[in-house]
Each structure stands twice: as structure tokens, then as C-alpha cells.
Amino acid sequence: MLRVAIRRLPHAEGLPLPAYATEQSAGMDLYAAVTDPVVLGPGERAVIPSGIAIALPPGFEAQVRARSGLALRHGICMANGVGTIDADYRGEIGVLLLNAGREPFTITRGMRIAQLVVARFERIAWVESEVLDDTARGAGGFGSTGTHP
């Protein structure tokens, strides 16, 4: 198991550290470290503090992802799709939420607002080429495989 240093910031006192909800969960819940409720109107976005900072080892990243229940029930999603926390970042993890729903949504202290997934990654070096190898798919994209088998 990878051990990662975490720092609880003063405004997160009393909140749980990120944790896996089940034995097989890939993501850990992040909690809103707000002091006062934040109301997101339809179409509005805001950075919600998590109250934590982490020190990932080289070769790892943390991905901040939306919670599916908030998206389904309230239209609350990540404004940037997936947020990336780099191994050399030591600041507070902020969660950029967007209300894509039709009603205002209130974020309260301690609410589970996102998931954090830690993953290994590889750095690459580009090798410029005039020709790429052939595949069955080729250049087909944007729905080229259809919607049904």
C-alpha cells in the first residue's frame, strides 16, 4: 500500500480525512471544508476548499472526480471534468464544482463533494513521425463505432 503524507489545514478541523467508502472503492471521498454554506445557482461554479494538502511521490497523480450521485440528482459536476493534482503540488486541494442543474444547490460543511483517485503515470518523450502504424480503427473517432453492438 502506498503511503502518502497529508496535511489537515486549520479550516478542516473536525472533518474526516479522505477515506474509501467500501472495500473495493477506487476513490476516496473529499469533504467540503467551508465555514459557511455556499449556494451555487444554476450555471454557477465555485472552488470549494477540501481543507487538505498532500505530498504525492514522483510518478503519481491524484485525480479529483465528480460524485455520480450529486451529478444525477442535482446536476453538480466538475467544471473542469477531472482535476489533476501533480506530485509537486503542495497547496490545498480545491474542488471546482459547477451547477449544471435547474435549481440552486447548497454546499454545507462536511458534505461529500468529490472523489480523489491516486494513480501512477508515465512521462513520455515525443518521437515525431511522418507515418503512424495502422490499426483496425484508424482515424475513426467521435462516434465512429456506433451506439449499439
Image (spheres, rainbow, N blue to C red):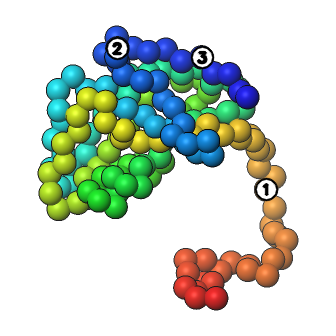
Q: Which of 15 and 87 is in front in this view?
A: 15
Quadrant of the rendered image containing residue 74 = bottom left
Mark 3 or 2: in front is 2
Mark 2 or 1: in front is 2
Q: Where is residue 29 in the image (x, y as percent from the top left)?
A: 46, 37
Q: Is mark 3 on a helix, strand or loop?
A: strand
Q: Which residue lies furthest to the top in this view?
A: 10
Q: Distance between the residues labelled 3 and 1?
A: 39 Å
Mark sitting earlier along the chain (3/1): 3
Above or below, 106 relative to 149: above
Q: Nearer the viewer, residue 98 or 76?
A: 76
Mark 3 or 1: in front is 3
Q: What residue does disc 1 label? A: 128
Q: Where is residue 23 in the image (x, y as percent from the top left)?
A: 61, 41
Q: Where is residue 119 in the image (x, y as percent from the top left)?
A: 66, 40
Amino acid bearing label 3 = Ala
Quadrant of the rendered image containing residue 149 = bottom right
Q: What residue does disc 2 label? A: 13
Q: Distance between the residues labelled 2 and 1?
A: 51 Å
Residue at the location (48% across, 20% down)?
53
Is 27 placed left or right of 50 in the picture?
right
Q: What residue does disc 3 label? A: 5
Mark sitting earlier along the chain (2/1): 2
Q: Distance between the residues labelled 3 and 2?
A: 17 Å
